[in-house]
Amino acid sequence: MKHFKRLLILIAIIAAVCVSCFSADTQKANNEIQLTDTTEQKLYYKEPQSVMINGRDYLMSSLPTGKFGGEFITSVIGEGPKTFNPWTSKDATSTEIGGLLYDGLLGTDVNTGEVIPNLAKSYEISADKKTYTIVLRKGLKWSDGKEITADDIVFTWNEIVKGGYGNTSLRDSVIIDGQFPLVEKTDKYTAKFTTIKPFAPFLRFLTEPIAPEHVFKHVLKKGKRYFDSYMDTTVNPKDMVTSGAFRLEEYVPAQRVVLKRYNDYYRINKDGQKLPYLDKYVLQIVGDLNNELLKFEAGELDIINVRGNDAARFKENESKGGYKMYNLGPNTGTMFLAFNMSKFKNEKGEYNVNPVKQKWFNDINFRTAVDYAVDKESEVANILNGVGEPLFTAEPLGSIFLNKKIAKGHKRNIRLAEEYLKKSGFYKDKNGKLYDKDGNFVEFDLYTNAGNTERESAGVMIKEDLSELGMKINFKPIEFNSLIGKLTGTLDWDTMIMGLTGSTLEPHGGKNVWNSNGPLHIFNQRTEENLGKNVLPFEEQIDEIFEKGAAELNFEKRKKYYDKYQQIIYDERPVVYLYSQLRLIAVRNRIGNVYPTVLGGAIHNIAEIYVK
């Protein structure tokens, strides 16, 4: 374990020290933007320190004292949040907002990747690596003035998480050999978590938020369906009891989410004044990436993720545009084309996927042919303008668990793709149209979320790539919430371009995706009545790998397990990975205390950020 921590710290510190202001040579060679590091100043964020004042425990900022007031304006693509309940959240926007409304027991040091105290004042791991003792800060308050205690911890884990309320990803991720951790209250401010055996990822799961027992115990009595709708987008902000730096003030559908400052937060500045500095955190809901770009250029947004094809222009206009650009290294997420391999029927007795298409998507030769036909290098060149790399692995390129043997993947090869199709009896007619061995013309739908112009561009290119094989692809961008409805609800889709957030430090967070019964097991999703059914051999292998990998504490031994799961995904191709772009971010100069890091992003320290 010590070896793992030392290695993790070393790698993360190297990455963090390399974070600097982005600089690009605007001359283009081979349609790529050449990136260089010309910044003399290196930004290094200093984590807050624990202090006790008048019997209350605080986290004191180590950053320069800022100015109180003002608002920070950011944006999101699509329709906005689906819920304000972080325990039911399944989309990135809802999860992001939930993280501002509710805090977890622990957090992550954005320089080293180490787990650090948050609501907790301290934590301790027993000698046998099975018991985690959490001691809360004294004087913590819910937004309604009630004290935060160990009862809230025990309630959250034993009732909400273990009870399977809302999104069950956390529950599924911490079940070890079929057993949920034992969670007990030791005293008013202390709780203990005991796992059945050593479990390497467990500490990081304690970064998840905890809920106020005095509010949610009444909600649970009304059942899971009521819980799923509790604190949805129709909620009255005054009814919400939270613990984070901000509270919900207003939600205007398809327009904006406004969060306001929580006045009794446990973080303070050097002068002992309570943070956050900002009066408001505003999330504007924009229709698409182009609209977001226009809003930033008009000065209506304080931060934006810069697309590769905009990087040169952004850099050229940096000085006069009133913003600064930062390069945070490879994206921590993954972008991919998924096949719906489901053989299950819906409540009406109808197959989720047409049986003819089921045969295609469950054919390894078909999936391999698609992989070799997709031109990832062209996607990087044309969609990202060269600011990125082709992706072939289930782990992001910046992960310390990356399988480097397969990370470079393979070149596009149409002839090889055609050979794989022939192995399964596919053939072309005289017009170049592709048919399967039963005479069915190969035609299927490809979905992605409308408004995300990068994914829409990828869809157009994939449609063109596969047409060279004689396939007809019906590309259908749809509204994001409708897409999620198909993905996790009706399951009536053929193929889909999607992206998932990831971690550079802990692969086990992806168990909800890769476990055969996981709630985000996209390519072969199982409803409750189908759990454990029709599990494919390679799915069984991955299930076993994630169990063994989580139980192994030695980093090098753990990595061998996760190398193997990446190899299986690479060989079986239930999803075809597309590309990984660099995280380029522009932040307005009017915003102070901006200390971007590879692990934390640009506004990880939102409570310390201020308007100059």
Image (cartoon, grey):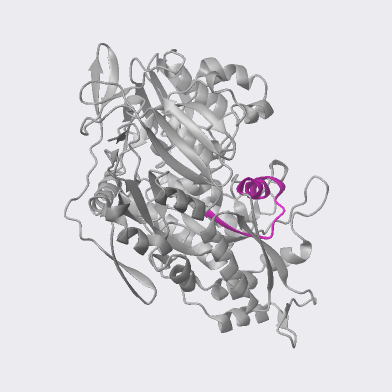
Which residue is nearer to you in this view: 235 or 9? 235
Q: Residue furthest bottom?
A: 430
Q: Quadrant of residue 314?
A: bottom left
Q: Is residue 11 above or below residue 612?
A: below
Q: Is residue 292 above or below residue 316?
A: above
**Residue 29 as seen in the image, left or right of residue 309:** left
Location of residue 383 with respect to 101 vertically, above or below: below
Q: Position of residue 224 (x, y in %)?
A: 66, 28
Is 487 part of what is drawn in magenta?
A: yes
Magenta highlight on residue 515? no
Query: Magenta stretch?
Result: 480-500
In the image, residue 90 lies at what x, y percent? 57, 41
Residue displayed at 47% across by 45% down: 509
Residue 142 x %, y %: 44, 18
Count of labels shown?
0
Q: Is residue 397 something that shows in the picture?
A: yes
**Closest to the observer, 2 or 471:** 471
